[in-house]
Image (cartoon, rainbow, N blue to C red):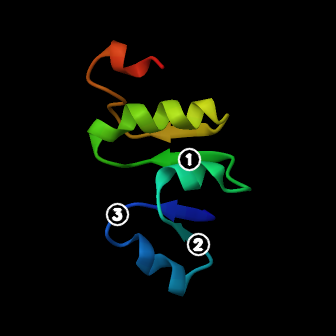
Amino acid sequence: MVALTGGSRAKDWHPTTRVEALPDFPSLLKRDGIDAVLIATPHHLHAGQVIAAAKQGKHILVEKPMATCVADCEP
């Protein structure tokens, strides 16, 4: 893991590790060296984040569910 974002404790990782804490998900997708993302956010955010990561060509591991209906999974 080279970077993370989100959550109330994300900023606390940086001082004790070499993991970079980024301000938001779009900045994570733009960071050099990010080949894959693990999405473990609240369920209602999954589909938008998965679609954004896919558009950037990232490999994606997402907690289930991606969305509550198929239509929300389409860009």
> Quick one: SS at disc 2?
loop
- Alpha-carbon span between mark 2 and mark 3: 14 Å
Picture residue at 38% right of the left edge, 40% below the top: 63
Q: How many neighbours does mark 1 have within 10 angstroms: few (below 14), some (14-19), or many (20 or more)? A: many
In the picture of the structure, the residue carrying the numbered disc 3 is: 7
> Quick one: SS at disc 3?
loop
What amino acid is at disc 1?
Val
What amino acid is at disc 3?
Gly
Q: Which mark is residue 19?
A: 2
Q: Which of 9 and 48 is in front in this view?
A: 48
Q: Which mark is residue 37?
A: 1
Q: How many neighbours does mark 3 have within 10 angstroms: few (below 14), some (14-19), or many (20 or more)? A: few
* Vertical arrangement, residue 33 with respect to residue 35, above or below: below
> Quick one: SS at disc 1?
strand
Number of residue marks: 3
* Vertical arrangement, residue 42 with respect to residue 66, above or below: below
Task: Residue 4: give x, y in percent of width and height.
Answer: 51, 62
Task: Residue 45: give x, y in percent of width and height.
Answer: 34, 40
Q: Which of marks 1 and 3 is nearer the N terminus?
A: 3
- Alpha-carbon span between mark 1 and mark 3: 15 Å
- Alpha-carbon span between mark 2 and mark 1: 14 Å
Question: In the image, is 56 to the left or to the right of 32?
Answer: left
Q: Which of 4 and 63 is in front in this view?
A: 4
Task: Residue 24: give x, y in percent of width and height.
Answer: 47, 57
Q: Which residue lies furthest to the top in this view?
A: 71
Tag 2 and tag 1, C-beta contact below 8 Å: no
Quarter residue 44 falls in: top left
